[in-house]
Amino acid sequence: MSAALSVCGALLAGCSGASDGDGRSRPEGTGASASGSATAAVAASPQSGEPGAGAADARFTADPARLPGNRSAALELLRAVVAGPDGYGPGYERRTPYESDPADRPVLGTDCVWRQEALPGDVLGSLTRYSRLPAADGRGEVRTAATVTVHRTAAQADWEIADTLEQALRCPDQQLRATERISGLNSVGSGYGSNGNTSADDYLTEIGTYADPALGAKATHYVWSQARLGPVTLAVAVQGGAGYQLNDLLVIPARAIATMETKVRTRLGARR
């Protein structure tokens, strides 16, 4: 978790905080990419299985024999790994619907509107689970969405990270659903060994604001964090409730991603 929070700190150093904000599954900031360009981030990001940076190297190395080879095996992995309410802490519960269709995945169109589309050929499976922390003690409801995607190769998963970085540049304001909108996205991508990332091949954080009139007149903070271990990407989006500070919300995806990383390492990592 400390590595994830170090990456968040690097992002916040270049962002302006939202006073009462939240957002889709991405964070608030200036709308300019703190990483420069997605292409540069991918080029600087080492591939899974390359040598690490020292004796304390915790770099993930997948065992080819344990990687899913078809959609059925990918779905089995997804159901075992994707975080539910217990991945965040006490008080969280399931939202309705609880799971997405694993044959679909969200895609951001050229019009900056999100839609569900069928999986492309290079993706074996993708599953999202939706959870919530009910409003309490004068603070609003926190909504979370954990998504794990299994690609056929690590290179294809790497391009998913690159595409996410490009999305914040191309669409700093995005439409989620009819009344839900994310604004002012700011993102930073960190390859293994940079910005405190010592666990994942890549780590990405976005901050912005989230608005939904159904939840109140004021926008709230939005945080999105995503990690890659070989061909698997792990993401958590947090839509913060009224009364939550940004620092309160940054811990939420860090905890859930750390838990999911451990499960992926246990199931797919090379035995040393």
Image (cartoon, rainbow, N blue to C red):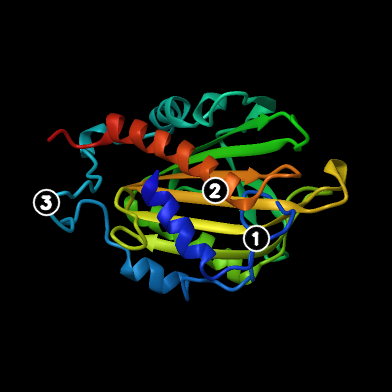
Q: CA distance from mark 1 to mark 3?
A: 37 Å
Mark 2 or mark 3: which comes first in sequence?
A: 3
- 13 above or below 266? below
Quadrant of res 47: bottom left
Disc sitting over residue 55 in the figure: 3
Q: Which residue lies at the image location 65% right of the left edge and 52% below the top edge?
A: 222
Q: Which residue is mark 1?
A: 28
Q: Is residue 23 visible?
A: no
Cβ atoms at labels 2 and 3 below 8 Å apart: no
Q: Which residue is mark 2?
A: 250
Mark 1 or mark 3: which comes first in sequence?
A: 1
- Within 10 angstroms of label 2, few (less than 14), some, or many (20 or more) residues? many
Q: Which residue lies at the image location 30% right of the left edge and 58% below the top edge?
A: 192
- Within 10 angstroms of label 1, few (less than 14), some, or many (20 or more) residues? many
- 217 above or below 102? below
Taking depth in this image into account, of 200 and 147 the one nearest to the observer is: 200
> Helix, strand, or loop for circle 1?
loop
Quadrant of res 267: top left
Residue 130 locus on image (x, y percent): 63, 32
| Three-letter residue code for mark 1 | Glu
44 vs 116, left or right, is: left
Q: CA distance from mark 2 to mark 3?
A: 30 Å
Q: Which residue lies at the image location 66% right of the left edge and 67% below the top edge?
A: 171
Cβ atoms at labels 1 and 3 below 8 Å apart: no
> Helix, strand, or loop for circle 2?
helix
Taking depth in this image into account, of 220 and 245 the one nearest to the observer is: 245
Residue 200 locus on image (x, y percent): 33, 49
249 vs 47, left or right, is: right
Mark 2 or mark 1: which comes first in sequence?
A: 1
Q: Is residue 221 visible?
A: yes
Taking depth in this image into account, of 246 and 71 the one nearest to the observer is: 246
Residue 126 locus on image (x, y percent): 51, 39
